[in-house]
Amino acid sequence: MGSKENKPNLIRRFLSALGPGVITGAADDDPSGIATYSIAGAQHGTALLWTALLTWPLMAFVQMMCARIGMVTGRGLAGALHRKYPRPLIIVAAIALFGANSINVGADLSGMADAAEMLTHLNSHVFVILFGVGISLATIWFRYHQIAAILKWLALVLFAYVITGFIIRPDWRLIAHDTFIPSWPKSHEQWGTLVAILGTSISPYLFFWQASQEVEEEKAEGRRMLSRRFGATKGEIITRKIDVDLGTFFSNLVMFFIILTTALTLHNHGLTNIESTKDASQALIPLAGKFAATLFTLGIVGVGFLAIPTLTGSAAYALAETFAWREGLDEPFRGARHFYVVVIISTLIGIAMDFLNVNPVRALYWTAVINGLLAPFLLLGIIFAAADAKLMKDQPSSIPSIVLVSVATLLMFGAAIGMFVF
């Protein structure tokens, strides 16, 4: 089994560590996530900046637990859970994930198309088709290592939001106060936004994608037989932890700057009725300047190219592992037809949503409902699986990891209840 323990220097080791964790973290800031964070900043100002500090460790421990399951068992998340839980439960979870992801794809395509329309003045419907078809064809045509390389470079697009945050010249003393001294939500609206932030940050599709990419990484290293993928060296686990920690930090840093940018521009000028990324982008032009608004808009398009393959791919992995189909981004279309058909159908549903004039905000609400109900139960299953020494080949997750993911699970159960209360 290959090991990454003997790298000549720290820089090479650091760079070699960048992989599935960075891609997964960046994919979390998809156009629908950007909309959620923009609404949080526009409606509540800097009052919820502290949530970036809360979600980072929780997201990091959840993603690392999923990564560990993939690395140690040699299977994707659905495949590993199938060894511990009844198949009907896994089928329900996989179908629910497919439904939620397809709705999310539709919302993301709409967000990307609206942003592209603002930049080019061409009809957004044209871009929905171009983006949807183009991303699907790229997912089918390119092999895993090519897709992974493209997605890693696309993650750099998110720096647009960090740059935008500095352009508006915030008062960093005030920002530090609201970041490090949390303010308790004071209204139903703030509680509801907190629920949305949790649901957006800790999403089921990321669990499946992270574990499946670990399997793809091992296959790319030549471990195509399941028995050769069992177990992981200490060096490999440390390397992935660096990757996941960096990816989740990056994700939450971007979340922080989106809330900051919209809080100091839109909220401070009384523009709180923001329902989409398009609203946020248009409102930023007179307040933050055309350059900052253009960066914000370009970021939406770029991150969509990163997030949509993650959404369609995670659903395809889950269903393929559940129904024992041949799967993987390294497989040609003929070799994994069912897997790629799921990718295509999920994308077509997303395109159809735009042409049927489905309100993307309402669509995201129903995505949040499905994810809010699915996520805590999935996390429970993941915790028990990660703690199972037999399933985990005598390499179960550590007690601190189990405790932190349990905290995330309790918060997600609270979020699920909060959806119905608020």
Image (tube, rainbow, N blue to C red):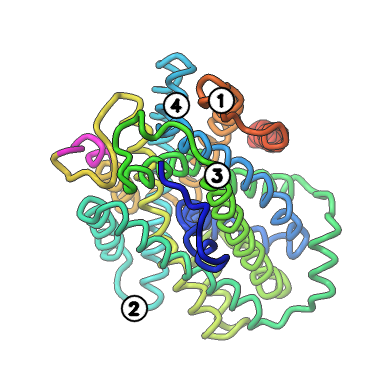
Cα–Cα span, label 4 and label 1: 15 Å
Tell me the distance, in whole angstroms, between the alpha carbons under discs 4 and 2.
46 Å
Name the element at disc 1: loop
Amino acid of disc 2: Thr
Q: Amino acid at mark 1?
A: Asp
Is 226 placed left or right of 100 in the picture? left
Counting residues from the N terminus, which is met first, the one under dot 3 or under dot 1? 3
Q: Is residue 6 visible?
A: yes
Q: Please state, as top left, top right, bottom left or bottom right, where the N terminus lies in the image.
A: top left
**Mark 1 residue crowding within 10 angstroms, few (<14) / some (14–19) / many (20+):** few
> Which residue occupies the extreme top position in the image?
86
Type of amino acid under label 3: Ile
- Mark 3–mark 2 contact, CB under 8 Å? no
Q: Position of residue 114 (x, y in %)?
A: 40, 66
What span is in magenta? 335-342
Query: Which residue, given by chain and number where applicable, does mark 1 sit on?
Result: 394
Please name the residue shown 20% across and 54% down the image. Answer: 141
Mark 4 element type: helix
* Location of mark 2 (residue): 120
The tag on residue 105 is: none
Looking at the image, can residue 28 be seen? no
The residue to which callout 3 is attached is 237
Q: Which residue is mark 4?
A: 80
